[in-house]
Image: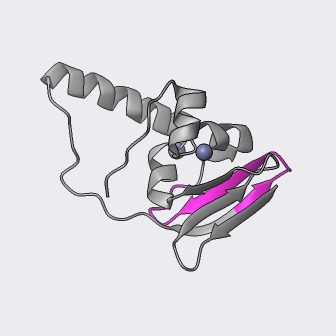
Amino acid sequence: MDVKVHVSTGAGVDIAWSDGHTSHFDFVYLRELCPCALCNDEREKKGKFSSATGGSALPMFKARVTAKGASAVGNYALSIQFSDGHATGIYSFEHLREICPCEKCGVEFRGGVTHVVKN
Ligand SMILES: [Zn+2]
Ligand SMILES: [Zn+2]
């Protein structure tokens, strides 16, 4: 498989999987779905908050996140240093395949749920 992280252009991450599938991830998308404990917590809180207020809590303003750098973690994961200073997220390739934003993977891994991240 082939992993390309477009740090300088801010275009995101492209992965060509060993089974021939290709995925493209925006940095914004990856930041939103950061798998670290901190962000898991945050998402949980947000979820509780929005259900408590009965509406979808859209952020007032969200700066477009890009990446300052990225590095491989062993041969199983990718670590991304985001422009907002967040760098604790370790994206295992297994996880990345599961959050592949394409429709096909949505059906295969998430029962048809496609993550939508608005900029
Ligand atoms: Zn995080
Ligand atoms: Zn896919």
Q: Is residue 103 left or right of residue 17?
A: left
Task: Identify whether 93 is placed above or below 62.
Answer: above
Q: Can you say whether 81 is above or below 112 in the image?
A: below
Residue 55's spot in the image, x, y percent?
A: 15, 29
Q: Residue at x 47, y 29 (%)?
A: 112
Q: Nearer the viewer, residue 115 or 85?
A: 115
* Number of disc labels: 0
**Where 68 falls versus 88 (above or below)?**
below
> Which of the 4 image quarters holds residue 119?
bottom left
Residue 114 falls inside the magenta stretch: no
Q: Residue furthest bottom?
A: 8
Numbered range of the magenta stretch = 71-86
Q: For residue 23, say whether it is visible.
A: yes
What colour scheme has been applied to the protein in the rendered image? one colour
Residue at image coords 60%, 48%: 88
Q: Is residue 101 above or below residue 111?
A: below
| Residue at the image point whose x is 31% and y is 52% from the top | 118
Q: Is residue 36 visible?
A: no
Decide if residue 2 is on the left or right side of residue 63: right
Residue in the picture at 44% in, 37% down = 114
The quadrant of the picture occupied by the N terminus is bottom right
The picture places residue 34, in percent across and down from the top left corner, at 53, 44
Relative to residue 6, is residue 33 drawn left or right? left
Residue 83 is situated, as x and y percent measured from the top left of the image, at: 48, 66
